[in-house]
Amino acid sequence: MTDCDIVIVGAGPAGATAALNLAPFHRVLLIDLRATPHSRIGESLPGAARRLMTDMGLWQGFVSDGHAPRHLHRSVWGNADISERDALADPDGHGWHLDRARFERRLRATAAARGAMLLAPARPRAVVREGARWRISLDHDGHARDITARLIVDAAGRGSRVPTGSGARRIVDDRLICTWLRGHAPLADGATQIEAEAGGWWYAAPLPHGEAVLAFHTDADLPDARLCRDPAALLRRARRLPMLGPQLNAADWDEAMHGTCAAQGAALAPPAGADWIAVGDAALAFDPLSSQGLFNALYTGLAGAETAERMLSGDSQASADYAQELAQVRATYRAHLAAWYGMERRWPDQPFWSRRHGAERSRRPANAAGVCSGSGSAAMIAGETG
Ligand SMILES: Cc1cc2nc3c(=O)[nH]c(=O)nc-3n(C[C@H](O)[C@H](O)[C@H](O)COP(=O)(O)OP(=O)(O)OC[C@H]3O[C@@H](n4cnc5c(N)ncnc54)[C@H](O)[C@@H]3O)c2cc1C
């Protein structure tokens, strides 16, 4: 039996960030299903993350990992014109096209260097309350192992099923899915590109090692969702796009490197209890149009660590304060999102768009802590038009 203060389930960006902030002061166990981080589809990090990483002592390591800078956004949104926005206009400076696996390896390694114990591959098989402690039965690389802890941090991502027995429920905003394809040729000039069409919207961006990703976002219950099952049809459809279409011919798209994932906004209510807390996508997940997910993972990893610290010292107001902070972040995010979708009015009869226009708010959003206003995919649209 291993005894620790805090068990963190999920060593993605949010869990590893919580771990590296807590490990200098507590006995922290960080567990993950995967022995090593795997690559994800195109992930861009906004420039506003620079401040957070500096505050947490991560900046020098991040720079030395050589992630590609992201200077240019290009979009077709709201009308047929191509708009461009240079990061020079962003007060936070340029963002990055992340090498996602490298980014996560760096966070995990920093957590371990600061004293966290990392178990991977490992997953909880049973979680029960025993008096003032949790007992967690783990499967660690095929071996059973028991852990006790005062606090559980749920950092297992948007599909989290960590059973804290709290009665918290997941609120899901819509049925957005993303279907994607990877290829072996760089897209023009390394820009992040977004293009709206009747059935949803497209995203294209460079990846590390000369690769690129092309992704289509629509609702799972709409006819266009059938493109998820047919990468050749996905590519045929993309080739007809006025902006992205002509660029795709130069790329060598690999129909085997194809996948589909859930992409809707979601929230856990409440995101914390007396002896557990959720961080990252497990607490708040974002529509990828916002490019907000990784910033939020870093932000809630840090805010969650501060809240955990307060909980361990017996502060009974800590989880309510955290819930309030996240509610404010979510309200601001949803107002931004409604405004961004509201800018695209060319297909009012198409369900993908009319559903989102129904959610639109008339007021312009105010910024809140934890929402970066800078260089996300949607911010480039707002930057052009607003
Ligand atoms: C299509 C799409 C595109 C996106 N593009 C962007 C973008 O360009 N920029 C951006 O900022 N964000 C983007 N995001 C969002 C971003 O990927 C997430 O917000 C981010 O990964 C959240 O980090 P996390 O640590 O909370 O969760 P995750 O990254 O999902 O990490 C969760 C970790 O928990 C582990 N885990 C899960 N279950 C268990 C278990 N039972 N036991 C142990 N371990 C477990 C997993 O292996 C994983 O390592 C995108 C999301 C989608 C869906």
Image (spheres, rainbow, N blue to C red):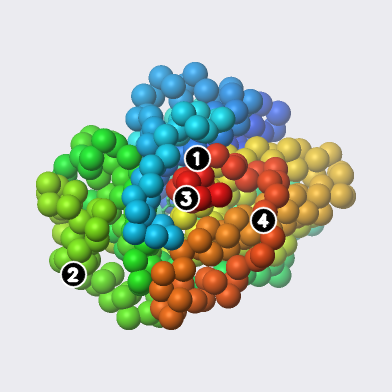
Mark 1 sits on what residue? 375
Mark 4 sits on what residue? 364
| Residue pictured at 38% horizontal, 24% vertical | 65
> Which comes sooner in the sequence, label 3 or label 1?
1
The type of residue carrying mark 2 is Ala
Mark 2 sits on what residue? 233
The answer for how far apart the CA atoms under marks 2 and 3 are is: 28 Å
**Which tag is nearer the camera, tag 2 or tag 3?**
3
| Residue pictured at 84% horizontal, 39% vertical | 313
User: With 290 as the anchor, is 367 left or right in this view?
Assistant: right
Mark 3 sits on what residue? 381
**Which tag is nearer the camera, tag 4 or tag 1?**
4
> Which comes sooner in the sequence, label 2 or label 3?
2
The type of residue carrying mark 4 is Arg
Residue 153's tag is none
Give residue 191's quadrant in the image: top left
Q: In the depicted view, which residue is nearer to us: 195 or 128?
A: 195
Helix, strand, or loop for circle 3?
A: helix
Above or below 105: residue 341: below
